[in-house]
Amino acid sequence: MYLDKINLNGKKVLIRVDFNVPLDKTFKVTDDTRIRGAIPTIEYVLQHGGAVILMSHLGRPQKKKLEDGSLDRERFSLKHTVTCLSTLLGQSVDFVDDTIGSKVVSKVDKIQMGDVLVLENTRFYKEEKEGDERFAEQLAKLADIYVNDAFGTAHRAHASTCTVARYFSKGSKAFGFLVKKELESAQRLTNKPLRPFTAIVGGAKVSDKILLLDKLVDTVDNIVIGGGMAYTLIKAQGGEVGNSLFEEDKIQTAKQLLSKAKAKGVRILLPYDSVIADKFDNGASIKVVQSSNIPIGWMGLDIGDKAVEKFEDVIINSKTLVWNGPMGVFEMSNFAKGTSKIAESVVAATENGAFSLVGGGDSVAAINKAGKADQVSFVSTGGGAMLKLLEGVVLPAVGAILD
């Protein structure tokens, strides 16, 4: 059920958004991407005669308390997002410094159609992450309709993302337009994708992505692997990886993955060569060697030119692409080239007519750093949620709307 299928006229609409945005030392929003992402849904409700009540989390206030054990209500307050939201909407936005309770109820009782109200950080209540039913019920009583437009938290069974939906009938709960885009893009990867279908997977550890890799072997034609996780697979093939990051306890798992891929005719491409360093530092001594022959005392921190060339050839000739994870330590300029080159090849494939989805915090950061986010088909706002979708998991927040 999507928002455009519901009659919103005269209704109070409770929208779970993702306003977990970065703030500077003066608490000003430094990146409004997530707030901008919610604007189409908010504006649609307003244009169709409804009133908007927004809820979101911001940071981890329960884990980053003050020295006396109290919540840092100033640092993690959603009031800091109000000015940015008001500017983007072109209208005034109200705020209430609580999430549930009499103060909130009083504020909501006075709301007029066309108004926008932001509730305080849902995570100021530990009941949020616990998925507490009583907390969720109090949220639900604030509105006639519930809309989830926070894809980035859709894989978490929290009160405001999941439990609250149980208190609304099927015709009174829906996905917002941001979640709609995410789900439709994921479906393009899982429902008869154009081939060749290539997955580009990077990052530090195989253990973080093993479920994804296992699922991808069932659906893709090629898996391009870079980053630290590549060295566990290279080690599993009998290679020498020196002091590169690898997981000894995942060697057997890596062998099983390689065996499954071979049996299914799926190509797993590992970097032929690596940019190696004698320490984890941008100023370290650097040389390029074969990835399966890295000397002791040296570690692989990026893919080499031969690896880039091989990877590019596969990517540019693909018709469907999903990219999750960088090819090296791209935060350091001397080890960013591989990731940058992969970004360029994903863009080139997109220009050739491929559908390309970039998901995952580091991948999104890499494509943004390359200034090419607007040159791929879709950039997902939820790395963890997108990973779970691609693993074949029904996200709790998605299931709650469909129930």
Image (cartoon, helix red, strand yellow):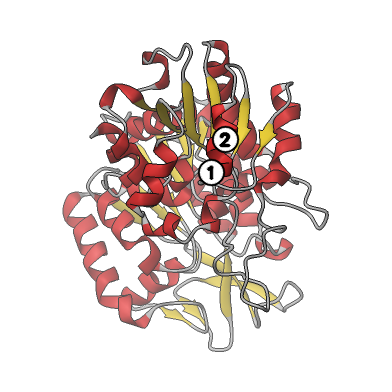
Measured in 3D between alpha carbons, the distance from the residue under mark 2 to the one under mark 1, in whole angstroms, is 6 Å
Amino acid type assigned to the residue bearing label 1 in the image: Ser
Describe residue 14's horizontal placement relative to residue 373 as left or right.
left
The residue positioned 45% from the left and 47% from the top of the image is 153
Q: In which quarter of the image is residue 175?
A: top left
In this rendering, the answer to whether 4 lies above or below 250 is above
Q: Where is residue 332 in the image (x, y as percent from the top left)?
A: 70, 64
The image's mark for residue 73 is: none
Q: Mark 1 points at which residue?
A: 102
Query: Which residue, as the protein is rendered here, is positioned at the far left?
Result: 263
Q: Please state if 73 lies on the left or on the right of 5 as rendered.
A: right
Task: Please count the marks in the image.
Answer: 2
| Residue situated in front as seen by the camera: 259 or 16 | 16
Q: Position of residue 61 (x, y in %)?
A: 59, 63
Is 357 situated left or right of 220 in this image? right
Q: Which residue is drawn at 60% across and 52% down?
A: 58
| Residue that appears at 34% across and 35% down | 189
Q: Name the residue under label 2.
A: 106
For mark 2, does the 10 Å Cα neighbourhood hold few (<14), some (14 to 19), or many (20 or more) residues? few
Q: Position of residue 311 (x, y in %)?
A: 48, 49
Q: Nearer the viewer, residue 230 or 90?
A: 90
Most foreground residue, 160 or 312: 160
Q: Where is residue 283 in the image (x, y as percent from the top left)?
A: 77, 75
Q: Quadrant of residue 96?
A: top right
Disc 2, SS: helix
Disc 2 and disc 1 in contact, CB within 8 angstroms? yes
Viewer-nearest residue: 33 or 295: 33
Q: Please, what secondary structure does the residue beneath circle 1 have?
A: helix
Q: What residue type is labelled 2?
A: Ser
Is the C terminus in the top left, top right, bottom left or bottom right quadrant? Answer: top left
